[in-house]
Amino acid sequence: MRSAASGAAALQRRVFLTLTGASLLAAPWARGAWADVPEMKKLLAGRTPKQGGITLDVPAIAENGMVVPLNIAAESPMTDADHIKTLHVFAEGNPNPMVASFSFTPECGRAAASTRMRLAQTQNIVVLAETSTGEVRVANAEVKVTIGGCGG
């Protein structure tokens, strides 16, 4: 039989391991993994993006890298004073990492877009959202590609 103290210690250990695992997953963004992609570095212009506020819907596994669906949406009040200006999509492992940019105005009512992209290999997809207030948000997801779409 366990004592209350050992049960509390086990719970604290689980919480610690969970938080450590989550921080390891987020660690590349905390260190600035985007620094390897010149287009992202230029776009950020020294700003540090914040996680959250972006829904990125891509398949975890793409059978064919020639046609990979992408749905993105960013939370925003879409007012004159505070709205999403642009959503930028990058595929870090492609020969040309910039996949698409979508521009929005408050009249759009919602900052959301859907498209298809080509992926050369298994890689990270990164979405940067620029707001009218100068803030930049980021979301990313890995897509495993079984047959590449950018090769010859």
Image: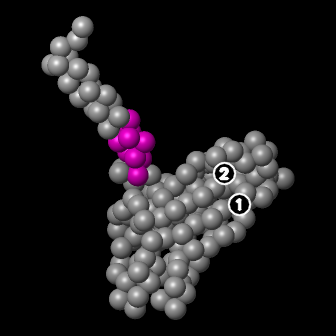
Secondary structure mostly taken by the magenta-highlighted segment of the chain: helix
Residue 33 at x, y = what percent?
Answer: 44, 52
| Residue reaching furthest to the front | 1
Question: Which residue does the numbered mark 2 point to in the structure image?
Answer: 59
| Residue 73 spot, x, y in % from top left | 54, 69
Residue 19 image point, x, y percent: 32, 38
Of residues 101 and 73, the one drawn nearer to the viewer in this rendering:
73
Quarter location, residue 88: bottom right
Magenta residues (range): 21-29
Q: Residue 2, relative to residue 98: is it above or below? A: above
- Mark 1 lies on a secondary structure that is strand
What residue is drawn where x is 52% and y is 62%? 55
Query: Which residue lies at the image location 23% right of the left edge and 28% below the top edge?
Result: 12
Q: Are marks 2 and 1 in contact (CB under 8 Å)?
A: yes
Q: Which mark is drawn over residue 24?
A: none
- In what element is the residue under mark 2? loop
Q: Is residue 141 magenta?
A: no
Kind of residue sitting beneath label 1: Pro
Q: Which residue is mark 1?
A: 69
User: Relative to 53, is 150 on the left or the right?
Assistant: right
User: Which amino acid type is marked by label 2?
Assistant: Pro
Residue at the far right in the pictured view: 152
